[in-house]
Image (cartoon, rainbow, N blue to C red):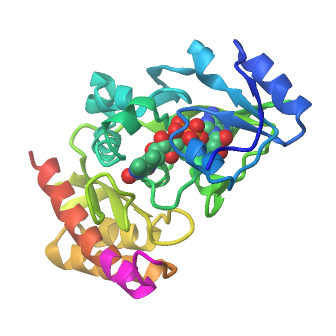
Amino acid sequence: MKPVKFDYHAPASLDEALALLRRYGGDAKILAGGQSLMPLLNFRLSRPAALVDLNRIPSLAYIEEHDGQVRFGAMTRQRMIEFSPLVARRLPLLREATKWVGHLPIRTRGTIGGSIAHADPSAEYPAVLTALDGEVVARGPKGERVVKAKDLFVTYLTTSLEPDEILVEVRLPATDAGAGFALEEFARRHGDFAIVAIAALVVPDGARCRAARLATAGAGPVPVRLRAAEQILERDGLTDAAIDAAAGRAAELVSPDSDIHASADYRRHLTAVLTRRALRRALRVAHG
Ligand SMILES: Cc1cc2nc3c(=O)[nH]c(=O)nc-3n(C[C@H](O)[C@H](O)[C@H](O)COP(=O)(O)OP(=O)(O)OC[C@H]3O[C@@H](n4cnc5c(N)ncnc54)[C@H](O)[C@@H]3O)c2cc1C
């Protein structure tokens, strides 16, 4: 199938893009890498009156460190993230997550802003944003606002961004030296969307755990921050018993749905298995 007819605009500035969104009053779609939007258009699941293409706005693609955060322009390609020395050093969890995103041609076109704005519940970047308590910057007719990860994801493929807002920047706190990280995923084939994935970060402090961060992909309509599981580790340390207890608690914290790929029970089971695996590997990474 082919898309229904639409107007196409390729603005050269953000202000021009915002004016176009305003002009179409919610009936325009932003085009970033097109890796999720184009299939939706081709299947006619999305029928916007216009596309506003951000690909001619070079100022939206960058990776920089600022005030303890790594900041990404929304149009930064996933492939650029995969090979960024700054990301490898300061956000190794995001680098690892990127390798799980689709295949080479998808990562070459796909953007970090597009992945987060698309809010696929099985996508890796929203899980990392949630685990690390990151935030995005949205620009709209009233100016800019910062939206925390916990306030961004509403349900399947839906965020709290307004139709006339553009996600312009993604901000993630840089990782402490000495932290351990892991993203464990189960998918039918490498490159498929996750059935379940767990993003984990731990900061050991001798026998104790100074901080733990855990979030899911694929275990519900939005990524789930597993705070009660993190608290077990922060209270009891990173012993095998505490890791087992945290993994068991993780499975209780999610409410997955059944679909053609997996039942809700299976996704809950995977949540426990992958949380245990991710924590054990994160601990090994932290110990070098
Ligand atoms: C075969 C295949 C396998 C894939 N596997 C995976 C996978 O394993 N994991 C994974 O995470 N992803 C996967 N993807 C999706 C891929 O990561 C996409 O790149 C991503 O979901 C969307 O990014 P994009 O830049 O292509 O956005 P687009 O497709 O251009 O846009 C997606 C949506 O976000 C909106 N949008 C885009 N940018 C902005 C912005 N700056 N502000 C506001 N709204 C915006 C668009 O209007 C649209 O609604 C796969 C895709 C394919 C085709």
As for residue 119 lying within the magenta part, the answer is no
Q: Nearer the viewer, residue 40 or 111?
A: 40
Q: Residue at x 35, y 42 (%)?
A: 94
Q: Position of residue 208 (x, y in %)?
A: 22, 61
Q: Is residue 68 visible?
A: no
Q: Residue at x 51, y 20 (%)?
A: 61
Q: Is residue 219 left or right of residue 73?
A: left
Q: Position of residue 53 (x, y in %)?
A: 66, 26
As displayed, is residue 244 above or below residue 120? below
The quadrant the C terminus occupies is: top left
The image quadrant that residue 50 belongs to is top right
Q: Position of residue 38 (x, y in %)?
A: 58, 42
Q: Is residue 117 left or right of residue 239?
A: right
Q: Nearer the viewer, residue 274 or 157?
A: 157
The image quadrant that residue 6 belongs to is top right
Q: Residue at x 17, y 64 (%)?
A: 280
Q: Nearer the viewer, residue 16 or 285?
A: 16
Residue ranking furthest to the left: 288
Q: Residue at x 31, y 49 (%)?
A: 100
Tell me the chief SS of the magenta region.
Answer: helix
Which residues lie in the magenta part? 260-270
Q: Is residue 20 visible?
A: yes
As displayed, is residue 217 above or below residue 273? above
